[in-house]
Amino acid sequence: MVKNSFISIISQEQEEKEENKGSVEFQVFSFTKKIRRLTSHLELHKKDFLSQRGLQKILGKRQRLLAYLSKKNRVRYKKLIGQLDIREPKTR
């Protein structure tokens, strides 16, 4: 899978920057990794409602972090969206 190989490249870059575990980019990256893992799990186990709830909570956390980053620094936000291949949410 192209996305998984791309994520492994980004994770190697993030592991080199061990001191930045609290940064918004690292948090969004780790949430994205969890989201993709849970999504693949839910494709196999459709009735796992506890995992669905966990996925929804993680999606909400990532959405809030991305909203914060887009307000504070639009350039870093665009770069992160491009790196993780996340679709930018539509605004009203």
Image (cartoon, grey):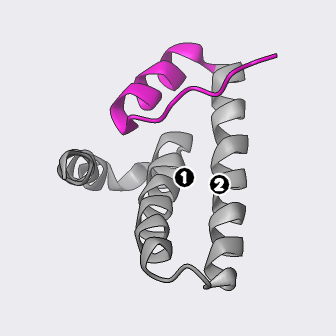
State how far apart marks 1 and 2 are (Cα): 18 Å
For the residue marked with disc 2, what is the amino acid? Answer: Leu
**Residue under numbered circle 1:** 22
Tell me if residue 30 comes above or below residue 41 in the rendering: above
Q: Quadrant of the C terminus?
A: top right
For the residue marked with disc 1, what is the amino acid? Answer: Gly
The x and y percentages for residue 30 are 46, 57
- Left or right: 44 in relation to 46: left
How crowded pointer 2 is (Cα within 10 Å; few <14, some 14-19, many 20+) is rated as some
For the residue labelled by badge 2, is the local secondary structure a helix, a strand or a loop? helix
Tell me if residue 80 comes above or below residue 25 in the rendering: above
Residue at 50 percent of width and 83 percent of height:
45
Q: Which residues are magenta?
A: 73-92
**Pick the front one: 84 or 53:** 53
**Pick the front one: 24 or 66:** 66
* Residue mark closest to the camera, 1 vs 2: 2
The x and y percentages for residue 51 are 61, 79
Quadrant assignment, res 4: bottom left
- Left or right: 64 in relation to 58: right
